[in-house]
Image (cartoon, helix red, strand yellow):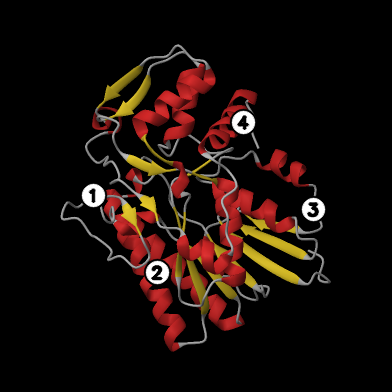
Amino acid sequence: MDKTLAKSVLVTGGFGFIGSHLVEMLLEKQDVGVHVVDNMVTSPIHLPAYLGQLGQSDRVSYDLCTVKEFFSRKNLPVFNEVYHLASVVGPVGVLKHGGRILQSTVDDSYAVADYCLRVKAKLCDVSTSEVYGGGRDGYCSEKDSMIIPPKVSVRLEYAVAKLGCEVALMNMSRVTELDTRIVRPFNVAGPRQSTEGGFVLPRFIKQALAGELITVYGDGRMIRAFTHVRDVADGIMRTMCCGRRGEAYNMGNPANKITILELAKQVAEITGSRSEISFVDPKTLWGPLFEEANDKYPDADRAINELGWRPQYDLQSTILETLEYIRAGRVN
């Protein structure tokens, strides 16, 4: 990487769904060099095609390994900023990691935090809206209490792991010189999102295009607020730049609030599909460990007022861009 660049940035999970869009947006700044750490286990991209698309070989470098492996090395380069996105992901994707999610999430977070503290790098930790446990009938504000439901599940382990790391990082920022801030994304969607983690929008689109039944879990009344991946990536960058040390920011578009059933209907209409909607029990598809998320939609006032964040993509454009990507059969 060119050592004359003004800023050197590390992105863990940088070849993931959100991470790959974040890397692209970081590279739009001409004075930034980006190093990616990703083990590619959940990456939706074809790496050679993606790197060719970036066309920034002098400003991009990478290591294909785990976060733990990377930070165990000696003589690591010094980065000015670290974006920590590496994590297991998805309502289905987390299931096979049950019992180990807490350990890996905590280990990775401490490895990142200790490095940032040592070299005095700014840290932006990407957490999850799952920490709210549903909030107030789905409405989630940074001012609300976190809710931990009584039923133990793999999904709960993921949420508790992320919440625990948030608390630890916030406390470290209070008692040490660690300069950290946290992002809680809400229902991210858009181009490159894979169906493999159990994400609903690409699944609905693929079913509609194939003329298959569009499978809605339960009665479809679950409430979400889908947020375009580039809006989230922009919000993550703004949080790094302008976010307050030791604070968390919801990153979600409340204007895109919708039920899953209405989303299925919109997908069918936009694709022109004749697919019918079928109501199914997700446990028959994914097994007894699967749990549906509680209703959730964000209060985004803190990000809007403090960071100047303005979501640019409404729900229709998010669906259309995801549709275009899937229809084109892209691999990057």
Of mark 4 and mark 1, the one earlier in the sequence is 1
Of mark 2 and mark 1, the one earlier in the sequence is 1
Q: Disc 4 and disc 2: Cα gap in Å?
A: 34 Å
Write down the residue under mark 1.
Answer: 153
Write down the residue under mark 4.
Answer: 325
Of mark 3 and mark 1, the one earlier in the sequence is 3
In front: label 4 or label 3:
4
Q: Disc 4 and disc 3: Cα gap in Å?
A: 24 Å
User: Which image quarter: residue 60?
Assistant: bottom right
Of mark 4 and mark 2, the one earlier in the sequence is 2
SS category of the residue bearing label 2: helix
Q: Are marks 4 and 3 in contact (CB under 8 Å)?
A: no
Q: Amino acid at mark 4?
A: Tyr
SS category of the residue bearing label 3: loop
Of mark 2 and mark 3, the one earlier in the sequence is 3
Q: Are marks 3 and 1 in contact (CB under 8 Å)?
A: no
Quadrant of the snapshot with the C terminus: top right
**Residue 100 showing in the rendered view:** no
At 57% from the left and 66% from the top, the residue drawn is 307
Q: Disc 3 and disc 1: Cα gap in Å?
A: 43 Å
- Residue 201: x and y in percent read 46, 33
Q: Is residue 52 above or below residue 66?
A: above
Q: Amino acid at mark 2?
A: Glu
Q: Is residue 85 above or below residue 115?
A: above
Q: Disc 2 and disc 3: Cα gap in Å?
A: 34 Å
Write down the residue under mark 3.
Answer: 57
Write down the residue under mark 2.
Answer: 166
